[in-house]
Amino acid sequence: MITISNHTPVSAADIQNKKIEEAKAEKKAEEEKQMNQAEDSKSPKRLTRDTYTPEEEPLCAGLYDKDGKLDPPKSSAPAKKSAEEKKCIANTDEVDREIEKLKKKKAQLKQEIAQTKDDPDKQENLKKQLSQVEEELKRKDNDTYRRQHTKFTYE
């Protein structure tokens, strides 16, 4: 038992219960204070919902005649479709010539390899050149390469 200055005996359980009640009262007061502030300031803690408010159709900004009807815009210059239309021409002749040159060089190297059976060093050198030409031909003789290297002209 604990005695207080006025000589009243108080148990530890009574003191603990008193503290719990005081804490509950403080918590309740704090919650009421927060609710009052939320109502006053419309804090974001409060849930709000968007609402749809229909509006009237906006008026057109334009020229109106005497009756209040909208006049279509009048163009100052006549439309010239022939001048606006351009003809686009795709030209792959340059790529085709390049591929033809490579094919001719390939055929020529094959002939030279066949003719130089006696000289293995020269034949090996020609085979290296032939493999390089074949690789370049593989890289260039396809639609992707043609599309990338097409020349466009507008008339």
Image: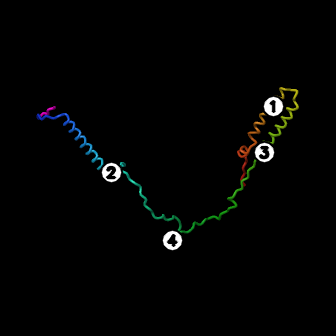
Q: Residue 73: which quarter of the image?
A: bottom right
Secondary structure at numbered mark 2: helix
Q: Residue at x 30, y 47 (%)?
A: 34
Q: Nearer the viewer, mark 3 or mark 4?
A: 3
Residue 37 screen position, x and y as percent: 30, 49
Label pair 4/1, CB-CB below 8 angstroms: no
Amino acid type, label 4: Gly
Q: Residue furthest bottom?
A: 67
The residue singled out by tag 4 in the image is 68
Q: Quadrant of the C terminus?
A: bottom right
Q: Residue 83 falls in which quadrant of the image?
A: bottom right
Question: Looking at the picture, how far across and down is residue 144, in whole percent?
Answer: 71, 44
Q: Dot 1 lies on which element?
A: helix
Q: What residue sits right under mark 3 in the picture? A: 96
Sooner in the amino-acid sequence: mark 3 or mark 4: 4
Q: Mark 1 sits on what residue?
A: 127
Q: Amino acid at mark 3?
A: Asp
Q: CA distance from mark 2 to mark 3?
A: 78 Å
Local secondary structure at mark 3 = helix
Q: Give the magenta-colored segment's residue range.
A: 1-5
In 3D space, how far apart are the residues under numbered discs 2 and 1 (Cα atoms)? 88 Å
Mark 2 residue type: Ser
